[in-house]
Amino acid sequence: MRRSLGLLLCLAFTVGCNSNNSVPTKVGSTETATGGASTDAKTLRIAVIPKGTTHVFWKSVHAGAEKAAKELGDVEILWKGPLLENDRDGQISVVQDFVTKKVNGICVAPLDKQALIAPINESVEAGIPVVIFDSALQDESKIVSYVATDNRKGGELAAHQMGTALGGKGGVIVLRYNAGSESTEQREDGFLDALAKEFPEIKILSSDQYAGTTQEESLTKATDVLNKYKDEVSGIFAVCEPNAAGILGALKETELAGKVKFIAFDPSEDLIRAMEAGTVHGIVLQDPVTMGYKSVMALVDKIRGKAVEKRISTGEFVATPENMKTEEMSKLLSPERFEK
């Protein structure tokens, strides 16, 4: 009897100890786990944190990250970010959550060049290496690498396209994006400096207004500014895709579409159609798929003890009505996107 009771207790203990292995992990509404099987102890769990999850650009970054995971074969991508690109606290919480979960590494596009320094440093101090992409930090001493477009050069390219489209003369509006966003600040400053240097006869009508992080905010602000300078404006520059979407709508509302030279940064289907129709006169392009791909590759290389460059460029380009149908520009105008 005692022998049978002991055997039953042993079996119960064994089942109890192993039961956790069969319990599925609950995934939050904004977190997507893909790539290699998470139950494999050898699989690297890489968190990829964008600035937001609604804009097309980030879906292409996601596609690049997944491409790297598939190529490596033993990497799982954990994709999670704030819904909107003005939620600094939300992004900080996501970083801290992944540190608590003890992922193998983190790739993050900082919403704020200052506010994300502390949580990123905390990750590194916890033994979790960090690659930043798209937008820089003020202090990058502890990160593995920065993978991004040369945003200042992108702004310079936009200035050259604007000046050429205007024939070197006219009045230009620059709508800024969001205070603290390093990538768009570099585009804004690069544009203004290059325009002043290359085209001194072009007058800056307004460059201190922020359009905000959504299409709706941008539409309202752009409409106000365009109405204010309606008799003077001959060109306008948008520094990112949600900014450009609002400006496109504002140009239509103020009946200035096609009359005002419009240079955008980052594509969308509406912007591409507008360039075909002659109401957009240039789009500065990044390579978000390559950005996501190289970010994950650099992080995995670091984890595996390989040397990694501190700065990895992903290139910058300009699509125009004249070159938009070429193979290279077509691919960058409509990059691959991750779809569940």
Image (tube, rainbow, N blue to C red):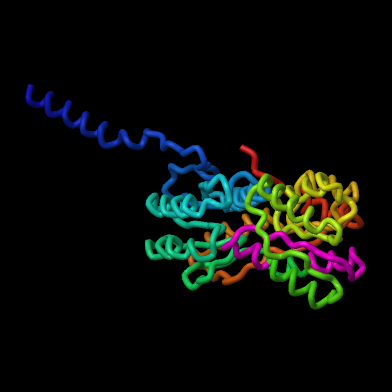
Q: Residue at x 43, y 42 (%)?
A: 39
In the figure, residue 296 lies in which quadrant?
A: bottom right
Q: Position of residue 92 (x, y in %)?
A: 46, 55
Tell me the residue at 56%/49% (across/down): 73
Q: Position of residue 289 (x, y in %)?
A: 68, 53
The answer to whether residue 143 is above or below residue 262 is: below
> Is residue 152 or residue 287 the one in the foreground?
152
Q: Is residue 166 magenta?
A: yes
Residue extending farthest left: 2
On the image, the x and y values in percent for residue 242 come to 69, 50
Q: Position of residue 187 (x, y in %)?
A: 70, 65
Q: How many numbered badges does the structure rendering display? A: 0
Query: Looking at the rendering, in which quadrant would you find the C terminus?
Result: top right
Residue 171 colored in magenta in the image: yes
Which residue occupies the extreme top position in the image?
Answer: 1
Which residue occupies 37% across, 33% down? 22
- The structure residue drawn at horizontal position 70% and vertical position 52%, both measured from the top left corner, is 221
Name the quadrant containing residue 287. bottom right
Judge by depth and name the residue closer to the eye, 219 or 156: 219
Report the side of 176 relative to 139 (left or right). right
**For the magenta stretch, what is the residue range?**
157-186
Foreground of the two, 23 or 331: 331
Answer left or right for 124 relative to 178.
Answer: left
Instruction: Name the image quarter holding the N terminus.
Output: top left
Residue 244 visible somewhere in the drawing? no
Q: Is residue 91 something one can see in this rendering?
A: yes
